[in-house]
Image: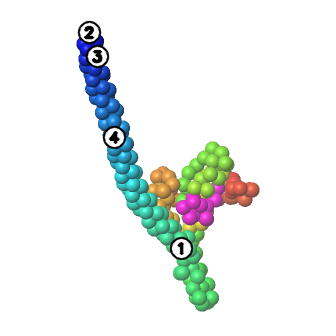
């Protein structure tokens, strides 16, 4: 009887050992596979992040190139016109007197980029213009609106600059002859008041 009990105990112990071995093998397998799976996931995430960074760098360089080319155009448009400032003062007087009545060369032109109900909103628009390199902008109060105007410009420069401002600031920007658009203006603290 004692032999049967020992054999049964041994058999049960062997079965239990086999079950534990299978369970340990599964745990060991998970212990081995988990770092591999985690490592592959991390590798995929790293590669996709690097690709996204490279795409973002390309977009940024394109935007910077566009900004630089726009700034060059704006700088060339806002610099003095060489026709208006010849070196010889006698020629200067003749050129200016003949060009005074020509709309292409007088600085009576401006580009209205927006019309706001409040002065702070118009001042914010001035800040937007300065961010793209335009320093010669002012606010004019006319008919109940504060209008942000890039002024003074010649007719030719205003036509060239209008394309840029429509693309960068406001697609509904337009050109006005400021001398006829705002006949009587007085300078206030932060704007011009058009009295009509």
Of helix, strand and loop, which one carries label 1? loop
Q: Residue at x 45, y 68 (%)?
A: 69
Q: Residue at x 53, y 81 (%)?
A: 83
Q: Identify residue for label 3.
A: 6
Label 4 close to label 2 by CB (< 8 Å):
no
Specify few, some or many for label 3: CA neighbours under 10 Å numbering under 14, 14-19, or 20 or more.
Answer: few
Which of pointers 2 and 3 lies earlier in the amino acid sequence? 2
Label 3 close to label 4 by CB (< 8 Å):
no
Q: Identify residue for label 4.
A: 32
Give the residues in magenta: 129-139
Label 2 close to label 3 by CB (< 8 Å):
no
Q: Nearer the viewer, residue 72 or 112?
A: 72
Q: Nearer the viewer, residue 153 or 69?
A: 69
Which of pointers 4 and 2 lies earlier in the amino acid sequence? 2
Of helix, strand and loop, which one carries label 2? loop
Q: Identify residue for label 1.
A: 105
> Disc 3 and disc 4: Cα gap in Å?
38 Å
Task: Tell me which corner region of the image, top left, top right, bottom left or bottom right, holds residue 106.
Answer: bottom right
Snapshot colouring:
rainbow
> Disc 1 and disc 4: Cα gap in Å?
80 Å
Of helix, strand and loop, which one carries label 3? helix
Which of pointers 1 and 2 indicates the residue nearer the eye? 2
Which of pointers 1 and 4 lies earlier in the amino acid sequence? 4
Q: Nearer the viewer, residue 8 or 52?
A: 8
Task: Tell me which corner region of the image, top left, top right, bottom left or bottom right, holds residue 22.
Answer: top left
Task: Using the image, determine if residue 17 lies above or below residue 131.
Answer: above
Q: Residue at x 64, y 56 (%)?
A: 139
Q: Identify residue for label 2.
A: 1
Specify few, some or many for label 1: CA neighbours under 10 Å numbering under 14, 14-19, or 20 or more.
Answer: many
> Disc 1 and disc 2: Cα gap in Å?
125 Å
Task: Using the image, determine if residue 122 lies above or below residue 65.
Answer: above
């Amino acid at each position: 009887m004692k032999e049967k009990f020992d054999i049964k105990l041994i058999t049960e112990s062997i079965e239990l050992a086999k079950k534990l071995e299978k369970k340990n093998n599964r745990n060991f397998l998970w212990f081995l596979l988990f770092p591999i799976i985690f490592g592959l996931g991390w590798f995929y995430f790293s590669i996709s992040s690097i690709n996204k960074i490279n795409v973002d760098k390309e977009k940024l360089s394109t935007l910077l190139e566009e900004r630089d080319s726009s700034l060059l155009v704006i700088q060339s448009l806002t610099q003095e016109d060489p026709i208006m400032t010849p070196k010889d003062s006698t020629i200067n007087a003749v050129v200016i007197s003949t060009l005074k009545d020509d709309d292409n060369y007088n600085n009576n032109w401006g580009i209205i980029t927006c019309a706001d109900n409040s002065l702070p909103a118009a001042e914010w628009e001035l800040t937007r213009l300065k961010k793209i390199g335009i320093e010669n902008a002012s606010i004019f109060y006319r008919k109940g609106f504060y209008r942000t105007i890039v002024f003074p410009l010649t007719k030719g420069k205003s036509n060239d600059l209008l394309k840029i401002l429509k693309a960068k600031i406001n697609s509904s920007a337009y050109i006005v002859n400021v001398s006829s658009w705002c006949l009587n203006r007085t300078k206030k603290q932060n704007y011009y008041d058009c009295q009509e």
